[in-house]
Image: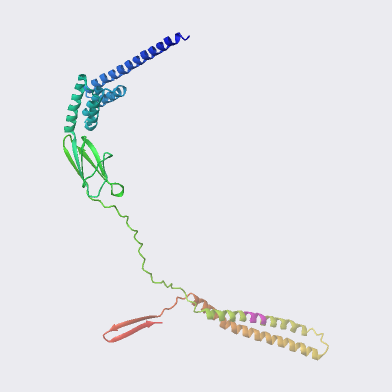
Amino acid sequence: MSKLLPWMMLLFIATVTVVASAQDEDVETRAKNLNAEGMKQLDLGNHAEALSRFEEAERLVHTPRSALRVAVALERLERYREAMAWAQKTNSRVTASADDEDPKREADALIARATSSLATVVVTAPRGEAKLKIDNEVIPLVDGIAQMAIDPGQHEAVLGEGPTEQRKAFVAVRAKRVDVQFVERVAPVAPSPTPAPTPAPKPPVVPDVATDEGSGRRFWGTLLTVFGTIATAGGLASLTVSYVQRGTISSGGFANANELNDRVDSINGLAKVGGVFIGAGGLALAFGIPLLVTGQAAKHAPSKRSELTLHVSGAGLNLVGSF
């Protein structure tokens, strides 16, 4: 068994080497095919499709040529700054061998073309502003001025942040200069709440209410009317009793003349009291009812207000009033 172990190790190493070589060959074949597809799309003018193929091939193999192809596609898309970065990556992969001189020369030529094709944006901002972004890239301001090379196309500059932030959209043209100017902007001040106007005091409204000037008459009228009614009723009751008792005299039944005389005096006295009550009640009703009626009418009568008017004329002063 110990004699077979070295042979088994050699067999394992050979197998791994063959598999690795096959995998490398597959990766290189895949990258080669992707580069071929990318070149075809590049010739057709489909630059975005070509870039996609070249980037995928670059992820498989990292050669100067693969980086240069990505740079060429980016240049066609006018993404010059990225194209220059990939061209520089191409140069970093080039070795001292003569075979690698062509990618380097092409990369240098691409960098020169991209540099001359970049637009230049010059931003002027108020002094004191320290934060400037162009397409989310922070650009330093020196004495209120910033300058940078930029790809052609639509861009946005943002100055400051918070309440004083300003935004400006601009279009950069190939190999041209574009100026973007910001003006000083003051943070908006929240308006103080305006106090509600105080309404002018309104004069007190004196309602034209009914006065109660007849309260005294109503009181005495009610008192006299009630008294007169009770007195009259009491007098009528006394007369009725005397009349009934007077009828019993004719029936007799008295022991002597004195008893008869006492009964007659009693009946006469009761009749007199009844007469007095009826007279007093009638008199009270005669005064009480008118007082009650006039007092009730005065309850709803409008009050009279005193008015005094001063008239000035050449003849003097005239006071005209009603009370």
Whether 259 is among the magenta residues is no
User: Which range is magenta?
Assistant: 229-234
Left or right position of 290 against 150: right
Looking at the image, can residue 92 be seen?
A: yes
Name the residue: 18% across, 32% down: 115
Instruction: Name the image quarter holding residue 4.
Output: top left
Residue with the most extreme front position:
2
Q: How many discs mark residues in the rendered view?
A: 0
Residue with the most extreme right position:
255
Q: Position of residue 232 (x, y in %)?
A: 64, 81
Q: Position of residue 35 (x, y in %)?
A: 26, 20
Name the residue: 74% across, 89% down: 265
274 and 202: which is toward the camera? 202
Looking at the image, can residue 46 be seen?
A: no
268 and 83: which is toward the camera? 83
Instruction: Name the image quarter holding residue 36.
Output: top left
